Amino acid sequence: MFIVFLRFTDRKSQAGQCMDGHKAWIKRGFAEGVFLLAGSLEPGLGGGILAHQTTHAALQQRVSEDPFVAEGIVTAEIHELDPGMADERLQFLVS
């Protein structure tokens, strides 16, 4: 499983120009079963995504296709998490 942090750069003011493409990219991640959760980093710092059923290399490629990343509006950090314990509702995430 992976946690992706998308942190705004000094180009944050240009986010509106790429928002439709960014939202479409997120929807595609959910439709393809890779994204489990997406939301904002508060207060207005960027966004975060919980991803699974992918490899680090494949996720890096996917993240590079985000218009926000491609246009330098955000920087991306990908962190791998190997869950060892989970609430029973999330047990499917434990390997």
Image: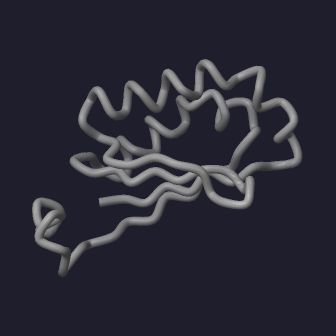
Instruction: Name the image quarter holding residue 59.
Output: top left
For this rendering, which residue is in front, 1 or 39? 39
Specify the quadrant that holds the N terminus.
bottom left
Identify whether 14 is placed above or below 85: above
Q: Height in image: 68 above or below 21?
A: below
Q: Residue 64, percent across and down?
A: 55, 36
Name the side, left or right, on which 57 lies relative to 54: right
Q: Give the answer, above or below, for where 54 lies relative to 30.
A: below
Going 82% across and 41% down the picture, which residue do you hit? 12
- Above or below residue 11? Residue 46 is below
Q: Position of residue 10 (x, y in %)?
A: 88, 47
Task: Please count the marks in the image.
Answer: 0
User: Image check: 19 left or right of 28?
Assistant: right
Along the viewing direction, whichever of 12 and 70 lies nearer the viewer? 12
Side (left or right) of 24 relative to 43: left
In this rendered view, identify the residue nearer to me: 56 or 11. Answer: 11
- Give the residue at x 59% y 20%: 21
Q: Position of residue 9 (x, y in %)?
A: 81, 49
Residue at 70% x, 23% y is: 18
Q: Residue 95 at x, y = what percent?
A: 11, 68
Asked which quadrant contains residue 2, the reply is bottom left
Residue at the bottom extreme, as displayed: 85
